[in-house]
Image (spheres, grey):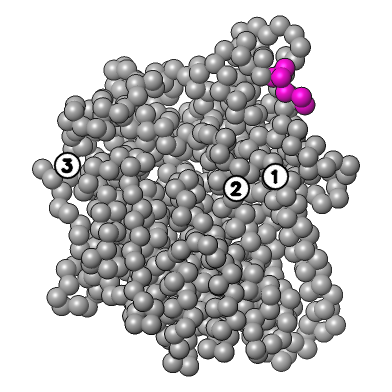
């Protein structure tokens, strides 16, 4: 039985747009296979006559169809707040089995390299049996479909989580929780009807049962394959789009980090250079490399919290500085001991590098390796994953600085929010404290700039593939996210969107207006035009969004792409909504220099919004149009359900 077609979804901006096909594919109504979906554009009318388009099915419209529930969640009043969840809300249900014909293209294109056998499938069914009351029900598919989901994990997701050693992998020997976690993620990429609900429900059951297993047998907390399963379940919970799963995953992050911290110390890896390498030596290296990669994958998930979610990370630079960096991907992908030895011996410099060394070499302007030039740095075997990990550490520092700066009452930009007694209390210490924080910011900016230039030899993705390609694309996007943290307050952006309640919206907008008009850190008092720092931030946010939406590889670099598009658009919306008409002219002039040779819907929408006069209170239609474009862009990203939740949030905000 075929599911209904969700053609009335309110996220579709224009009834006649080509985005309908994209949206139906996201909901699973069209059998779009991974990599085959097309990102169509909706032509913009002439801006002189253009009016903000209406959303189909607005709440309160008597003639509109009711909102169709999105697969990740049952609709609720929390939809207007990012990741907010009511525990008493209804759970999603899977009402139909995932049934696919043997001749379906999804199964025909499946590669059987990592298929599991009947015995492993039986163990999974046993593991997934409900152990607690009111556990969400789901319907397991056939073994053939489960293997196809498993194959998609390796085909679509492995590149961002290259922890398992594929040349020696035997799926049947993996513990059931790990295979289930991979099936959950693979199903997310399938775009098959019912697969998203199935994925979320199996995720919940797997997490519940794994937690019970850990409570019953504490030795499992030192089993690296079990911890990898735990990490994948946390990742899937964060980004699947189900708000209950997100909340549980956020809480589970602490346990995951704790378990990884308690793992036994690892001995240094031996490369076996210039000597005969035995099979045992190679297998010993594989075992150590796997354990290091597991640690780094957990660290990478942890650093996504400050960079993406505006929450502090748990793991510090100090506790990972003595870890050995991940090896180069070509070493990890070597199919046998001889091939591995040949690659190692061909490397001009040792590929075993401590993270502290990599961090100093890649981010310290005059420290670390003082006499090393960018050209000679390229000969050091920094893996592409290491590049991302170093930038992630800088992103955590940018987050810490931004929070300290935006909340500290000694900040000059906060003066308009302080009482006279508070200002007197600050006394003469205000200036020196502010200067120290500005010096800290400048050091972070210099480190990020150093990282950018020293990684130039690695930046091209033309010759990169698999994990190397993903880490380069993710680094490019993360660089833009770090820039946002250093040029505006994410906390105040969240307030402007309603996270702190209706009463905090105007305060958040007022602070964002002050930051943009005066400069987030420079505080150049002007009533004519924003300082160069603010225009730089506006131009960068625009260019980053345009680049991501115009590049299929960047769009696929989730979760970084999702939140770069979200935060970038919201920052642009805040600028337009809070800027008086006199301030919009220089911003519009700045927009003309952004990607001048690229035709972009976003640039057209911004140009229209900046040419629209407000009513004196920032209530023109221009800002609403930017939010609508953001929602449309996020729907197009759609593989991970978090994108649709954020799109729904912005659509609701645009209606207010």
Within-10-Å neighbours for mark 1: few <14, some 14–19, many 20+: many
| Residue placed furthest toward the right | 371
User: Could you give the CA–CA distance between mark 3 and mark 2, rounded to whole angstroms?
Assistant: 40 Å
The quadrant in which the N terminus is found is top left
Residue 54 percent location from the top left of the image = 28, 75
What residue is disc 2 on? 475
Q: Which residues are magenta?
A: 344-349
CA–CA distance between discs 1 and 3? 49 Å
Position of residue 373 in the picture relative to residue 26 (left or right): right
Q: Which residue is mark 1?
A: 455
Residue 629, quarter of the rendered image: bottom left
Image quadrant occupied by the C terminus: bottom left
Is 491 situated above or below 222?
below
Measuring 27% from the left and 59% from the top, which residue is drawn there?
A: 18
Q: Earlier in the sequence, mark 1 or mark 3?
A: 3
Circle 2 SS class? helix
Q: Looking at the image, which is closer to me, 432 or 531?
A: 531
In x, y percent, where is residue 447? Answer: 75, 54
Instruction: Tell me the number on the disc at residue 96.
Output: 3
Is residue 209 inside the magenta stretch? no
Residue 215 visible within the image: no
Query: In the image, 612: left or right of 109?
Result: right
Q: Nearer the viewer, mark 3 or mark 2?
A: 2
On the rendered structure, is 316 left or right of 654? right
Expressed as whole percent of the image width and height from the top left, the position of residue 194 reads 23, 43
Instruction: Find out whether the residues at labels 1 and 2 contact each other: C-beta distance under 8 Å.
Output: yes
Kindly state the secondary structure of the residue where label 3 is placed.
loop
Residue at left offset 59%, top offset 50%: 476
């Amino acid at each position: 039985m075929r599911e209904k077609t969700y053609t009335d979804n309110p996220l579709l901006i224009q009834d006649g747009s080509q985005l309908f096909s994209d949206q139906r594919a996201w909901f699973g109504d069209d059998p779009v296979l991974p990599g085959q979906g097309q990102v169509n554009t909706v032509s913009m009318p002439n801006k002189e006559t253009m009016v903000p388009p209406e959303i189909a099915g607005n709440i309160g419209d008597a003639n509109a169809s009711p909102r169709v529930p999105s697969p990740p969640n049952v609709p609720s009043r929390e939809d207007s707040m990012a990741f907010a969840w009511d525990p008493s809300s209804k759970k999603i249900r899977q009402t139909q089995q995932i049934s696919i014909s043997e001749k379906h293209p999804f199964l025909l294109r499946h590669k059987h390299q990592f298929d599991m056998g009947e015995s492993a499938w039986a163990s999974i069914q046993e593991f997934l049996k409900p152990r607690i009351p009111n556990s969400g029900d789901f319907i397991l598919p056939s073994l053939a479909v489960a293997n196809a989901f498993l194959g998609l994990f390796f085909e679509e997701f492995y590149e961002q989580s290259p922890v398992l050693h594929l040349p020696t992998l035997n799926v049947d020997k993996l513990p059931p929780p790990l295979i289930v976690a991979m099936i959950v993620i693979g199903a997310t990429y399938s775009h098959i009807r019912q697969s998203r609900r199935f994925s979320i429900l199996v995720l919940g059951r797997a997490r519940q049962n794994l937690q019970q297993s850990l409570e019953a047998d504490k030795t499992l907390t030192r089993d690296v394959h079990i911890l990898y399963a735990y990490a994948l379940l946390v990742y899937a919970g964060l980004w699947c789009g189900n708000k209950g799963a997100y909340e549980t995953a956020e809480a589970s992050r602490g346990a995951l980090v704790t378990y990884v911290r308690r793992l036994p110390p690892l001995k240094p890896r031996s490369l076996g250079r210039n000597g005969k390498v035995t099979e045992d030596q190679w297998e010993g290296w594989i075992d150590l490399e796997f354990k290091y990669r597991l640690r780094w994958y957990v660290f990478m998930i942890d650093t996504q919290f400050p960079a993406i979610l505006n929450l502090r990370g748990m793991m510090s630079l100090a506790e990972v500085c003595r870890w050995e960096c991940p090896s180069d991907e070509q070493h990890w992908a070597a199919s046998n001991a001889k091939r591995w030895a040949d690659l190692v011996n061909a490397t001009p410099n040792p590929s075993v590098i401590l993270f502290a060394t990599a961090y100093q070499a890649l981010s310290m302007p005059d420290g670390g390796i003082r006499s090393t030039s960018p050209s000679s740095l390229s000969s050091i075997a920094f893996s592409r994953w290491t590049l991302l990990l170093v930038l992630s550490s800088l992103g955590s520092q940018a987050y810490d600085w931004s929070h300290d700066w935006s909340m500290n009452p000694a900040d000059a930009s906060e003066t308009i929010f302080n009482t006279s007694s508070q200002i007197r209390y600050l006394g003469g210490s205000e200036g020196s404290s502010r200067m120290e924080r500005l010096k800290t910011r400048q050091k972070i900016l210099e480190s990020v700039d150093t990282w950018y230039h020293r990684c130039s030899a690695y930046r091209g993705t033309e010759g990169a593939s698999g994990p190397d390609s993903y880490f380069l694309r993710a680094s490019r996007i993360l660089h833009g996210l770090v820039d946002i943290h250093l040029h505006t307050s994410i906390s105040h952006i969240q307030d402007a969107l309603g996270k702190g309640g209706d009463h905090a919206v105007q305060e958040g907008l007022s602070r964002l207006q002050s930051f943009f008009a005066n400069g987030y850190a420079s505080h150049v008092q002007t009533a004519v035009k924003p300082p160069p720092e603010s225009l730089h931030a506006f131009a960068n946010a625009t260019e980053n969004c345009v680049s991501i939406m115009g590049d299929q590889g960047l769009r696929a670099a989730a979760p970084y792409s999702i939140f770069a598009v979200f935060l970038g658009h919201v920052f642009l919306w805040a600028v337009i909504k809070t800027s008086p008409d006199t301030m919009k002219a220089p911003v519009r002039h700045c927009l003309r220099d952004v990607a001048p040779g690229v035709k972009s819907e976003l640039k057209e929408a911004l140009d229209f919004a900046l040419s629209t006069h407000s009513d004196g209170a920032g209530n023109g239609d221009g800002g609403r149009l930017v939010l609508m474009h953001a929602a449309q862009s996020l729907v197009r990203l759609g593989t991970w359900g978090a994108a649709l939740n954020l799109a729904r949030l912005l659509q609701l905000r645009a209606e207010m």
